Image: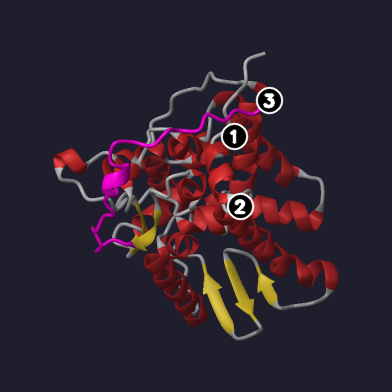
Amino acid sequence: MAAIKRPGAEAAVVKGWLGSRKWLLARRVSQLGILALFLLGPLAGIWIVKGNLNFSYTLGVLPLTDPYVLLQSVLTRHAPEGKAILGAVIVAAFYFLVGGRAYCSWVCPVNMVADLAHWLRRRLGITKSVRIARSVRYWLLGATLVLAGATGTIAWELVNPVSMFHRGLIFGVGAAWAVVLAVFLFDLVFSDRGWCGHVCPVGAFYSVLAMKSPVRVTAVRRAHCNDCMDCYAVCPEMQVIKPALKGAARGTGPVILSPNCTNCGRCIDVCSKSVFRFGVRFDDREVAPSPAKAGGVAQVAIADRA
C-alpha cells in the first residue's frame, strides 16, 4: 500500500515531536482542564467553579456568562440579573481581545469530537463530503435568535451539543450523548468538519466578536513557504489561510484577518519552515529569506507507513 504523508511529518523532524504539536497539546490541556474544573464540583464536591459554560461562578466571586446565551435570554423578554450582564461583558471583552473563535478551539469540548471525526476520516480514507455553504451557520445563528424571540424560550439550549456534552458527563448515558454522537457521525460520514466549520451557530456568534480582534495568526515568513500544503490540511477553516499566505503579489498583508480563524495554532505547529506565528492585526512586517536560501532549499519527503 502506498505511504500516506501525514501533515506535520516534516515539521516533526525539524522541530521535534513536541515542537510540532505544542499548540495542539496546549489546546487539549485547556479544553480538558476547563471541563475538569466544571466537573470537580458535582463529581468530587470541590466547587472551584459552579455552573457550566452558559453561566458560572469561579470561587464564588467571578461571574462568567456566555453572551450568546444572554442575548437569547434578552430576546425572550426576560430581564437578566446584573451579575449575568457583568459576566457577559467580561467574556465578550476577553474574546474580543484574543479572537472570538478561540472559544471554539481552546474551550468548546465539541471541538475534540470534531477533531476526532476528522482524524478518523483520514485514517479510514473517507474522502467524500457533502458540500455545505459556510454561510449556513450565520443563517442558523439568526434562526436561533428569532426562535428565542418567537417562543419566549432559549430553545437552542435544548439541542446545543456543548450543553449536551456537559450533561452527558455529569448524568451519564442519555439523550445528551445522542446529540454529541450525532455531531460526530455528521462530521465522520457526511461532511468533513461540517459541524464546527459550516453549521454551528455558536461559532458564528463568536466569529462576530472576532471581527476586529487584535490577536491574530500571521504568515510572517510567507516568503519561506515551500508549498507543502500541511497548513491547509490541518486548518479547520482552510479558506482563511490563502489571502495571507499567497497575497504578496496582490499587496495583501501576511496577517490572517478573517474572523473565522479559530486561532488554534495548528498551522504554526505543522509548518517546517516556521511560516506562521501569533501576532497582532496591526503588524504587517515580514521576514524575508536570506540570500543564501533565496534559491530554494531541498525539501525532505517524509511519509508515514500506511
Marks 1 and 3 close (CB-CB < 8 Å): no
- The quarter of the displayed image where residue 286 is located: bottom left
Of residues 94 and 268, the one drawn nearer to the viewer in this rendering: 268
Seen at 68% across and 75% down, the residue is 49
Seen at 52% across and 35% down, the residue is 193
Mark 1 or 3: in front is: 3
Q: Which mark is residue 305?
A: 3
Seen at 71% across and 46% down, the residue is 176
In three-dimensional space, the C-alpha distance between marks 1 and 3, rounded to whole angstroms, equals: 19 Å
Q: Secondary structure at mark 2?
A: helix
Q: Can you identify the residue that label 2 sits on?
A: 162
Mark 2 or 3: in front is: 3
Q: Can you identify the residue that label 1 sits on?
A: 118
2 or 3: tag closer to the N-terminus: 2
On screen, residue 150 above or below 2: below
In three-dimensional space, the C-alpha distance between marks 2 and 1, rounded to whole angstroms, equals: 18 Å
Residue 72 x, y percent position in the rendering: 45, 59
The answer to whether one can see residue 153 in this image is no
Outermost residue, right side: 44
2 or 1: tag closer to the N-terminus: 1
The magenta segment is 280-306
On screen, residue 298 above or below 31: above
Q: Three-letter amino acid code at disc 2?
A: Val
Q: Total number of numbered labels?
A: 3
Marks 2 and 1 close (CB-CB < 8 Å): no
Q: Is 249 left or right of 58, judged from the image as shown?
A: left
Q: Three-letter amino acid code at disc 3?
A: Arg
Of residues 151 and 264, the one drawn nearer to the viewer in this rendering: 264
Q: Three-letter amino acid code at disc 1?
A: His
Counting other residues with Cα less than 10 Å from the Cα at mark 2, is it few (<14), some (14-19), or many (20 or more)? many
Q: Quadrant of the C terminus?
A: top right
